[in-house]
Amino acid sequence: KSEDQKEVTNEKAKLPKPTGWRLLVLPFKMNEKTKGGIIMNESTLEKQQVGSQCGNVLAMGDACYKDKERYPNGPWCKVGDWVIFARYAGSRIQIEGGEVRLLNEDEVLATIQDPTDILHKF
């Protein structure tokens, strides 16, 4: 493995491993600069990130979506998907560089292709 691959592996090992029916989600972080080149201040970025409620599924517990009665059509999402969740859903865990969330499997409200497609207006 290259040094970069080892570093990524080491960083992943530091993340919490979800148990049971929980998912580990990395909340979407807005760009500091708009498409038009405007640099947003810190408070605007924080408001948009709280409002976005989008995240990327990093890991899933071993019991996620296994209940065939609750999920007869299969899993609602998979690792690598972008999901939308309620503003206060899950447990927030601080990590270097930000936070991750542990969500219950049923706290996923929707999947989306690209988090930047969600409009953030205040």
Image (tube, rainbow, N blue to C red):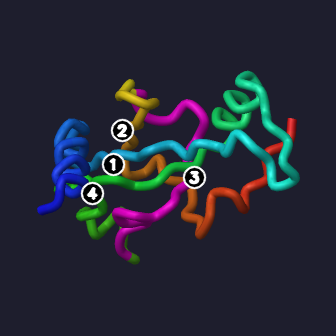
State the residue at coordinates (46%, 30%).
Answer: 98
**Residue type at numbered disc 4:** Cys
Residue mark closest to the camera, 1 vs 4: 1
**Residue type at numbered disc 3:** Ile
Q: Report how far apart the C-alphas of labels 1 and 2 lie in the structure.
A: 6 Å
Q: Report how far apart the C-alphas of labels 1 and 4 lie in the structure.
A: 8 Å
Give the residue number, with chain letter if any, for mark 4: 64
Earlier residue among tags 4 and 2 = 4
Q: Is residue 85 magenta?
A: yes
Residue 84's tag is 3
Earlier residue among tags 1 and 4 = 1
Q: Report how far apart the C-alphas of labels 4 and 3 lie in the structure.
A: 17 Å
Give the residue number, with chain letter if any, for mark 2: 102
Please determine whether, in this image, residue 45 is positioned above or below residue 57: above
Q: Tag 2's secondary structure? A: strand
Q: Tag 3's secondary structure? A: strand
Residue mark closest to the camera, 4 vs 2: 2
Give the residue number, with chain letter if any, for mark 1: 23
Earlier residue among tags 1 and 2 = 1
**How many tags in the picture?**
4
Callout 3: few (<14), some (14-19), or many (20+) C-alpha neighbours within 10 Å? Answer: many
Q: Report how far apart the C-alphas of labels 3 and 2 lie in the structure.
A: 13 Å
